[in-house]
Amino acid sequence: MNIKKIIYRTIENIFKSIKTKKKYNYKIHQNNKFSDYQINGIIEIIKKEKLHPKYIFKKIKNKFKKKKIFKKIKITPPGFINIFIKKKKIGKIIDKYVKIKNFGIKEKKKNIVIDYSSPNVAKEMHIGHLRSTILGDSIGNILEFLGHKVIRINHLGDWGTQFGMIIAWIKKYKKKKINNINTIENIYKKAQKKFLINTKFANLSRKYVVQLQKKKKKIIKIWKKIIKLTIKKNEKIYKILNIKLTKKNIIGESFYQKFLPSIVEDLVKKKIAYIKNKTVLVKTKNKNKQYILIIKKKDGGFLYSTTEIASIKYRYKKFKTNKIIYLVDTRQKLYLYQIFSIVKKAKYISKKTKLIHYDFGTILNKFGKPFKTREGKNIKLKKIIKKTILATKKIISFKKGNIYNEKKINKISYEIAISAIKYYDLSKNRIKNYIFDIKKMLSLKDNTGPYMQYAYTRIISVLKKNNTNIKESIKKNKLKISNQIEFNICKEITNLEEIIKLSSQGNPHIICHYLYKITSLFSKFYETNRIKNIKNKKIKNSKLKLISIIAKIIKICLSLLGIKVLNKM
């Protein structure tokens, strides 16, 4: 259904037939001003290959004339190729593909691991966890839609010195009632401070770390309780945000401990790692700079880096992965580069397996600073969610002509608020920082989640007034384009495949921009078409089908972002 792909293949076949020396880049634009599509950059290829322009342009014209979808080809100086599409043909193409599951959009199946969210143990999730969680889940949804097998992994930091600190505090001060994550978090904060200033307490903490590693029953029991309470709290947040992570997706650092001695031994044996003063180190290079990574401490302790290496080796063997994706913020860029270099050098994965780091920017407050409390602490995620739900509830409660009862207002407020938070994050370019602004994210005028939900409800309302539904309309009616706005909508519909595939490369914001474009076109259509008043049945049914397809696209795209549609707002 991708017209750009048809154009691209046609041009590629032309250059193959004249045996050009190499592959070249040229751009295909959708252009509503001068034509339907425009190809730029062909003249540069002609110059580099020392070809005759008239001969090539004639070949292009003849090749495109043979394709039934193209109406005419116009070439303007200095070499712009303007392509015009037949309206009837585009309607027939959409008629065919809209009935196929997922519009016939798919890729060759691959096994893809996504490592995302990874909140801290013994702490509540804060706003810093939002981007990794939402981005990772959305990318997973998109890849599943394309037909890949996605293995979602929540890599919990459930091992290490912090547990020694917490257990030491519990034991020292005989804390028996540990029933919630807030108690554990408070203990952790106090223990951390004492660890830094009190040598005796620091040594006691290290002693309990050793006991934890040796799996002493009483220590393991406390450790398990801390993990259980953390997971329970995180699961509530995942459920609220409609995130697909569950207990089954958790593979914590503790799981990999048994592999670490052999990993270090193997890296030393392969001369990738070396020993200096009883410390095991690895040298890596990046942009002509040399970096050193510790994988085993002098006291025999292992580090996060060792666990990371072990996790990649395990994931490749266990899941036969073609790709492992990490959703970790920009600060970890060099660290992950070092890990990836070591893993590749050690041949723990195949040459074909891709290791990808999708880094992302920071969420900022209204002053453009990292989002923190007055005390400099990270704001709890549940607090942000609650604040957004309350703001949504206020808007709905004071809405003129509101007929909803309290229970319905609560439910709708919740759905709109969650869509607002998720969409606002996903609509931003992943690598950029953004300001968290509740007022902007709840707007019904801009590129926001509530605006998309509202556009969907408007279509449902039109279909209801005309006694039809989406499935019925798509199945029975035929698409006949009767004006320019309908033609522009149809051209956008044919871009869906390209949009989803581009978004799968760590860029869900592309889907958001596409949704905004297609819903804006729908608004123009809605303003100029009063479907209920149309007497010609074929024209009326065609328009109903067109808006049904738009509704289907909105629903699909929002589901890829992890957002639910509403039938009423």
Image (cartoon, rainbow, N blue to C red):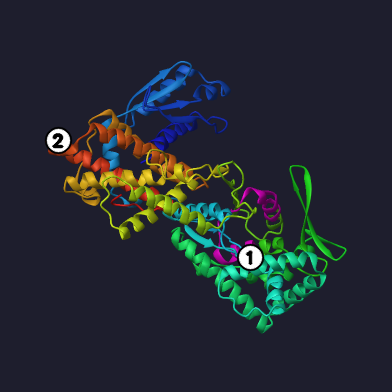
Residue projecting furthest to the left: 535
Mark 1 vs 2, N-terminal side: 1
What residue is rendered at 52% in x and 65% in y? Answer: 234
Residue depicted at 28% across the width and 54% down the height = 404
For numbered disc 2, what is the local secondary structure? loop
User: What amino acid is at disc 2?
Assistant: Ile
Compared to residue 46, the image places residue 404 above or below, namely below
Residue indicated by mark 2:
534
Badge 1, how many Cα within 10 Å: few under 14, some, many 20+? some
CA gap, disc 1 and disc 2 = 62 Å
Residue 203 falls in image quadrant: bottom right
Q: Which mark is residue 157?
A: 1
- Decide which of 391, 130 is in the foreground and name it: 391
Residue 233 or residue 24, whichever sits in front: 233
Q: Quick check: 37 left or right of 202? A: left
Question: What segment is highlighted magenta in the picture?
Answer: 312-340
Overall secondary structure of the magenta stretch? helix
Q: Is residue 324 magenta?
A: yes
Relative placement, left or right, of 340 versus 320 is right
Percent x, y for residue 3? 38, 36
Residue 306 image point, x, y percent: 71, 63
Q: Position of residue 453 (x, y in %)?
A: 35, 47
